[in-house]
């Protein structure tokens, strides 16, 4: 096997290649879920959101439909920037646009996403649906994008972090993320965060192990991407999608498990990766929270909680944090 140190230098000018190298040479192996979202991954996630088992999107849409007016009343009372981290298709945010325009709110929308493809699609949709909306897409990492926005505008800001994206970090990582986010915000700014709540474990597990196998394809698509972009030879049929939920911690984990002993060659890294039979690759975390944990996060990061918004089943909550 070629040692990790012998990778080609040019490969590491590519963050994707570097992260794949780090993850697949680690013990245990892992891949970063942020790289799920290429063009095919975006399409697969759209299918996931429509699955009957995947309650998260429906619950958050319900919150915006049911509590949109109340959310609006909590927002900035003058000109402000509406900034969305990980904007995706902007489905839920567009419900909020309706309330904002109904009240003649003076705001601009700045969606931030690492997927340029998703931002292009979002901007095209918004230009058609909301021609009066000022849209400034920002492709890149959250914090660097926020710094750029802060240099361009001194208006009050409402930051959206929806869809339980906070759950892709463990609790300590989520706390540090929020604290770092707080450092880039100013008194009066708001942060609306979507949290998937702890619930019947069967309901949680089904959302990540759908009968149609779309979530399986979503995970395997990352191996396809490595094959395509880095010249790897992953045999997708040799890996099994394995989701596991821990109701004690709220950790919903997804793994790809090698069903046989095998070696994968990655040409761009000049690297061979051995897999033992039944060895797992850690693919994704989707942590579920309870209200006590959310309150702790707010306190740790330096926010106050201004309000909670729930769907009827209390499967999900959007929590408004405020900088004071």
Image (cartoon, rainbow, N blue to C red):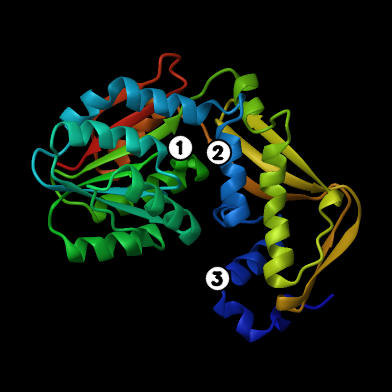
Q: Are marks 2 and 1 in contact (CB under 8 Å)?
A: yes
Q: Is residue 134 left or right of residue 219?
A: left
Q: Secondary structure at mark 3?
A: helix
Q: Secondary structure at mark 2?
A: strand
The numbered disc on residue 15 is: 3
Q: Position of residue 26 (x, y in %)?
A: 69, 62
Q: Residue at x 16, y 51 (%)?
A: 186
Q: Is residue 53 left or right of residue 314?
A: right
* Residue behind mark 2: 286
Q: Secondary structure at mark 1?
A: loop
- Dividing the picture into quadrants, the one containing residue 307 is top left
Q: Position of residue 150 (x, y in %)?
A: 21, 61
Graded by Cα atoms within 10 Å as few (under 14), some (14 to 19) or many (20 or more), the crowding at tag 3 reads few
Q: Is residue 73 left or right of residue 118?
A: left
Which numbered disc, 1 or 3, marks the residue that appears first in the sequence?
3
Graded by Cα atoms within 10 Å as few (under 14), some (14 to 19) or many (20 or more), the crowding at tag 1 reads many
Q: Is residue 27 visible?
A: no
* Residue behind mark 1: 164
């Amino acid at each position: 096997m070629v040692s990790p140190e012998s990778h080609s230098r040019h490969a590491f000018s590519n963050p994707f290649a570097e992260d794949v190298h780090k993850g697949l040479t680690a013990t245990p192996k892992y891949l970063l879920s942020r790289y799920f979202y290429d063009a095919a991954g975006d399409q697969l996630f759209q299918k996931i959101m429509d699955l009957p088992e995947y309650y998260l999107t429906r619950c958050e849409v319900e919150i915006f439909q049911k509590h949109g007016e109340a959310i609006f009343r909590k927002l900035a009372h003058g000109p402000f920037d509406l900034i969305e981290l990980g904007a995706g298709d902007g489905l839920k945010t567009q419900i909020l646009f309706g309330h904002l325009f109904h009240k003649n709110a003076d705001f601009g929308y700045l969606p931030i996403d690492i997927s340029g493809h998703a931002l292009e699609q979002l901007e095209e949709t918004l230009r058609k649906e909301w021609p009066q909306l000022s849209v400034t897409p920002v492709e890149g990492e959250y914090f660097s994008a926020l710094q750029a926005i802060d240099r361009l505008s001194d208006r009050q800001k409402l930051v959206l972090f929806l869809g339980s994206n906070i759950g892709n970090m463990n609790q300590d990582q989520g706390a540090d993320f929020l604290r770092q986010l707080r450092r880039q915000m100013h008194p009066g700014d708001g942060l609306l965060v979507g949290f998937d709540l702890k619930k019947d474990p069967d309901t949680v597990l089904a959302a990540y192990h759908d009968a149609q196998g779309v979530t399986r394809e979503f995970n395997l698509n990352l191996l396809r991407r490595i094959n395509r972009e880095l010249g790897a030879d992953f045999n997708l049929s040799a890996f099994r999608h394995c989701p596991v939920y821990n109701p004690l911690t709220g950790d919903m984990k997804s793994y790809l498990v090698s069903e046989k002993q095998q070696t994968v060659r990655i040409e761009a890294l000049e690297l061979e990766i051995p897999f033992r039979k039944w060895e797992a690759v850690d693919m994704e975390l989707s942590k579920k929270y309870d209200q006590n944990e959310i309150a702790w996060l707010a306190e740790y990061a330096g926010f106050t909680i201004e309000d909670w918004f729930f769907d009827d089943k209390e499967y999900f909550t959007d929590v408004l944090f405020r900088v004071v």
